[in-house]
Image: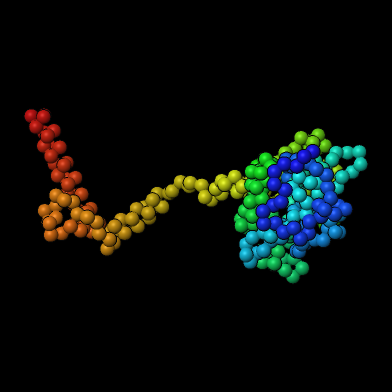
Amino acid sequence: MARTGPQKIPGASQSYFYGASRYSGSDMEVNCGVVHTTEGMSLPSYNGGAMAPTVTGVPDIKAKRIRWYQHYDVDESARALANKLGGVETNTANAFQIELVGTCDDSKKSAWAGKRAGVDYLHWPTAPDWALAEVAWLVRWLHDYHAVPLTCVKDWLAYGKDPRRPGVTPASYGASPARMSQSAWRSFTGWCGHQHVPENDHGDPGSMDFARVIQLAKGEPSPQEDDVALSDADIKKIADAVYNKLLKTDDVLTAPSDAADYKTNKSWTWQTHIQDVTTRVRAIQKAVDRLIASKGA
């Protein structure tokens, strides 16, 4: 299958590119993406490429950016998924694979091995918007240049174990409710996690908010940016602030040309304008009242 579209990701390091090695993959045309978390704090070695994804994202928390390392061409199969004999294809099923350095384990959402989440590493289910926006950039690029749909699966199950049930694997592991059937995987397009791919038992990237990634990739506002109905108290505060600004400001505007003192005073304050408008409105109202009265006589 011929590869179409650009094969190198803009700005991505090619320092750990394995496509030209003995682990080079098969040609394909990507139409879906699979998201993993490395469960580590640095760029993995992937055994020299034997288990590498298409690309790895290493968060630079201080700079609030992700540094991308590309391991395979976009339309070349990667090697981060299990692929059992006699089942469905996984790595070669048109899947672009992202590994995100960090964790999805909820037991590490605050601290991990003496390190602090959000400072030394990222806990992806609670990742800040800048990190999700960096992932969204790549998701959008793949949509624009390789037509990968800006959609994702609905359920992203939590990775962390239930503290009330020690020894029990996370809900997203194994034959979880989120894992696709083989037929569903064969027809899947869009984005999913490692926890959704058949023939695999890993549970990453946990409850990562990938719906937010898709929202950012589409350029849609976050819920907090949507219009919100103002309360009566909010409206009064705004009105009072505007009124006080108009009365106290030193800004001046051109006076109306029919003002009695226009020749000697062509600049009025906002307060003078308001008083003039009030006087004119009252004069108009008196004239209207007289006209109505004369019609009724």
Asked whether the viewer can see residue 121, the reply is: yes
Work out whether 114 lies above or below 74: below
Q: Residue at x 59, y 45 (%)?
A: 218
Indicate how the structure is coloured in the image.
Answer: rainbow
Q: Which quarter of the rendering shows the C terminus?
A: top left
Residue lying furthest right in this view?
A: 85
Left or right of 122: which side holds 239?
Answer: left
On the image, the x and y values in percent for residue 175 come to: 83, 44
Rendered location of residue 266, percent (x, y): 17, 57
Side of 221 where 16 appears, left or right: right
* 64 vs 108, nearest the viewer: 64
At horizontal 67% and vertical 53% (from top left) the residue drawn is 10
Classify 250 as above or below 185: below
Q: Quick one: 17 or 280, which is closer to the camera?
A: 17
Q: Is residue 41 above or below residue 169?
A: below
Identity of the residue drawn at 82% across and 37% down: 182
Residue 79 shows up from this direction: no
Q: Residue at x 18, y 51 (%)?
A: 256
Looking at the rendering, in which quadrant would you find the N terminus?
Answer: top right
Comparing 206 with 29, the one in front is 29
Residue closest to the far bottom? 114
Q: Residue furthest top?
A: 296
Q: How many labels were placed on the picture?
A: 0
Image position, residue 13 (x, y; %): 72, 59
Q: Is residue 293 left or right of residue 29?
A: left
x then y, percent, for residue 198:
82, 42
